[in-house]
Amino acid sequence: MEFNVRRLAADAGTFLSRAVQFTEEKFGQAEKTELDAHLDTLLSWAESTKHWTEKIMKQTEVLLQPNPNVRVEEFLYEMLDKKVPMRANNHELLGECMIDSGHEFGPGTAYGSALIKCGETEKLLGSAEKELIQSSAINFLTPFRNFIEGDFKTILKERKLLQNKRLDLDAAKNRLKKARVADARSAELNSSPPLGEEYVAHFSYMLSFLHVRWLKLWTEEVQQAETELRIAQSEFDRQAEITRLLLEGISSTHAHHLRCLNDFVDAQAIYYAQCYQYMVSLQKQLGSENAIFPSTFSNNNQQAGSSSASISVPTAQPAASLPAPPPSQASPALNELRSTSGTRKARVLYDYDAASSSELSLLADEVITVSSVPGMDTDWLMGQRGNQKGKVPFTYLELLN
């Protein structure tokens, strides 16, 4: 118990000495030992690294999980050291909704079948997004968080110790300075009292004599103050070296974060490539069905007497998937066009986007000039609009008399 009390008193004295030194420095009444320029630069570099690491980490979390409520929930589960429950993301929820509605409308219908296919693709997109989030959390966010919560906290701890050692060093310098000033003042004064009755007459000198004797106590402390200064300087230099070694490790941290950044970019590249493949596959599936249904809509419109109605087909179809020519257009006029290699006027039934530079894009209801080229596939004709020329699918045209 006696040891604890003495230790407590010593710690209280050290704390008070540091507080006094810190206060005097703030008011400009005490000198302050400045750190060397290299160490000061390393400290600024570490602070900048910590600041931007936190910002990048937070913005990445927002990117991967835009919902703030979900982020708070995941944070609470992490604090409680519990596993986050699995939940469907937005793509998967949309996919389930589309699949249910497609079954409701009927898988055999065009709309119902398309909804089911879109829903399945959305679920694939949701799975790919989960893989991206998992990969990014392991290879990118976790190393960044480990630096903030581990390495940088160690740097802060050592930097605080360095600050305390600096205050101890400056306080020791201040005590030594005061002891030397007191010793110099005591040497200047005459400590020999006068003889006889003059001693009583010089009462004021007695007071000065006692004051000098008190000042000489500082002289005895000069050696002790010098010893304390050497110890404080040694501890400060040792702590500065420890802090410097830790701060120089920031370069290794940057190299590690660079590897993590490459992993994050690779994960994003894989994710977007998967999404592109899924959507291209879905587009082809929907396009193969849409190539058949425009003819149905066109025939219905013609039977209703609407000659200006048109159906827009969003994607171009290859020759193998083009619909068969309507019976009404398998006429002698077409046979004559192909046999004579002449030209005819044709009205465009549906919009068509050229799939290559050899094809010609079409707009519904426009009139173009078409001709047959020997050796060309029977599903295609050569179309011309002004100076523009290219292949056009025959099923998208109506030959005019």
Image (cartoon, rainbow, N blue to C red):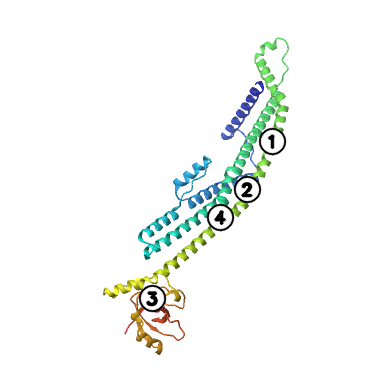
Please, is residue 190 above or below residue 308 in the view?
Answer: above
Q: Is tag 4's residue or tag 3's residue first in the polypeptide sequence? A: 4
Query: In terms of depth relative to the viewer, which is nearer, 32 or 297?
Result: 297
Which disc number belongs to residue 306?
Answer: none
**Residue matched to label 2:** 250
Q: Which residue is mark 1?
A: 235
Q: Nearer the viewer, mark 4 or mark 1?
A: 4
Q: Nearer the viewer, mark 1 or mark 2?
A: 2
Residue at 70%, 23% in the rendered image: 186
Q: Considering only order in the chain, which callout, 1 or 3, is on the residue closer to the N terminus?
A: 1
Q: Helix, strand, or loop for circle 4?
A: helix
Residue hosting label 3: 362
Residue drawn 43% across the image and 57% down it:
95
Give the amino acid type for the residue marked by disc 4 in the picture.
Answer: Phe
Q: CA distance from mark 3 to mark 1?
A: 84 Å
Could you classify mark 3 by the number of other residues whose Cα lies within 10 Å: few (under 14), some (14-19), or many (20 or more)?
Answer: many
Count of marks, rendered view: 4
- The vertical placement of 237 against 12, above or below, is below
Label 2, label 4: how far apart the Cα atoms are:
21 Å
Quadrant housing residue 213: top right
Answer left or right for 74 relative to 197.
left
Residue assigned mark 4: 264
Secondary structure found at label 1: helix
